[in-house]
Image: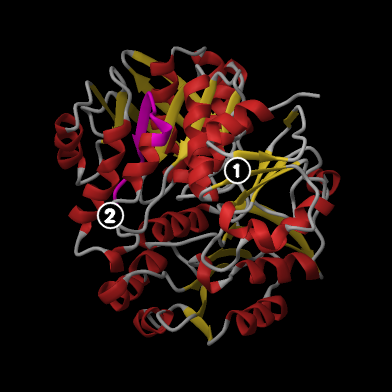
Amino acid sequence: MNLLWRSSEMAAALAGRPVGNLPEGVTGISIDSRSVAAGEAFFAIKGDRFDGHDFASLAVANGAALIIVSEAKLPALGRLTVPMIVVDDVLQALERLAVASRKRCQAEIVAVTGSVGKTTTKEMLRHALDPCGKVHAAVASFNNHWGVPLTLARMPADTDFGIFEIGMNHPGEIRPLVKLVRPHVAIITTIAAAHLGNFRNIEEIAAAKAEIFEGIEPHGHAILNRDNNQYAFLVKAAQDAGVENIHSFGQNPKAEYRLAEYDGSGEGSTLWASLGGETHEVAIGAPGRHLAENAMAVLGAAKLLGVDMAAAVQSFASLSPVKGRGARHALKVEGGRFTLIDESYNANPASMRAAIAVLAAARTGTGGRRIAVLGDMLEMGEFSDGVHAELAAPLATAGVDQVWLSGEAMTHLRDALPDTVTVEYRPTTEELAEFAVQAVRPGDVLMIKSSLGLGFGKIVKALLDNYPAFSDTERLN
């Protein structure tokens, strides 16, 4: 059995009290009773909506070999005979295990934050470093106060490269997380109007992102977007935090990792990367200029880590977008097929524009339409009306034929769009999903994007449930 943690090590790291005969060790860490696997440890974390202690029996039924519970909840778990480690606070105990994991591992650590592109950049890093050693990275977007320590606690001791995504909605949230991660390299993808309702301006967002500098290891590196208006501010913030090595990426002629040229299509792209005097031609198996821009940060990190650059460059060719972040589906419809671009995971003004540009580059079939299926961008606060209406210009420039909308804030975009664009508006996600299933036709390209709270994944699911996918064989014919 390949153990992630020995029970004795865990108990010591958690500062916990063993109850029962602990197993030799555990094969993994889980906080979800539904998906915990046999042999794993289950941490009964109390969240905003659910308390893991209420699901401890389900975790045991699903094979948890060990559960970590709080002292205060122990009396209510009296009937459970599974081995336990009892702690003062389960989330704090998970953080202590994260600290122990980081201490025992000699991996090179990379942390990623930014207003847009964190998860995609993390996945590109995973992809680029995979040929060069054992990589550990967060699943999905585990970038908050429980996701980061959980990802650290899951990191095997023999990891070569650890990749962590760190997010925030408010000031002060990145600081404690980056001090757990302690990266050797930190990337800020860009600063944009995300979560703007929780800040007075873009400068405050930049200051919150700059908290990542406070956890960089001595002699470590920061990689910053030189094309972003907040670049100078971030450089000074990094210097003030004592970061010794500051690097830049982007199209700016002064960028150390420079996007020299870009050639994009609806299916993929090619870029020419200038990296400290070396030029690499990089084929990316996914479309979008925004991917090419963040690829420069990834290549810069790879160079700083001293990996095989030829292998890292070659890895981009097999890159594919992930679910909710540009994943593509070719679906059968009577009379032909249509393309679904799934950007449903989240949205802010910058990522909306990037997704619209991807839609603009996508190839339609004969008689097909470019259709943007858009929902509200949440957490925009007093800026909400304006940032939604301002999407009318990039949609018109992109040559989008139809715009299908849902959400209260999207009424402002509906009213701002010119008469040359056909607009369909439905008050609820469910109504828009029903409409989309009925209205799609051969040759169409649909791009679906909204903030997660709108639940536009339901529209994606409705289309996937109603229209079968083309097989690889059918694609070639």
Judged left or right of residue 395, residue 153 is: right
Q: Nearer the viewer, residue 6 or 427?
A: 6
Residue 166 point in image, percent of width and height: 42, 44
The residue at 44%/84% (across/down) is 408
Q: Which residue is mark 2?
A: 171
Q: Assess disc 1: are there few (<14), some (14-19) or many (≥20) residues with their C-alpha within 10 Å of its C-alpha.
A: some
| Residue 27 part of the magenta-drawn span | no
Looking at the image, do the residues carrying marks 2 and 1 touch, with CB atoms under 8 Å apart?
no
The answer to whether 22 is drawn above or below residue 281 in the figure is: below
From the viewer's perspective, tell me whether residue 109 is left or right of residue 461.
Answer: left
Q: Amino acid at mark 2?
A: Pro
Q: CA distance from mark 2 to mark 1?
A: 24 Å
Q: How many marks?
A: 2
Q: Does residue 415 appear to the left or right of 92 in the view shown?
A: left
Q: Secondary structure at mark 2?
A: loop
Q: Nearer the viewer, residue 139 or 116?
A: 139
Looking at the image, can residue 77 be seen?
yes
Image point (60%, 43%), residue name: 139
User: Residue at coordinates 31% horizontally, 15% vertically from top-left?
Assistant: 276
* Image quarter of residue 476: top right
- What's drawn in magenta, residue-wise? 180-192
Task: Point out the tag, 2 or 1, that comes first from the N-terminus.
Answer: 1
Q: Position of residue 121 (x, y in %)?
A: 47, 39
At label 1, which amino acid type do we have?
A: Val
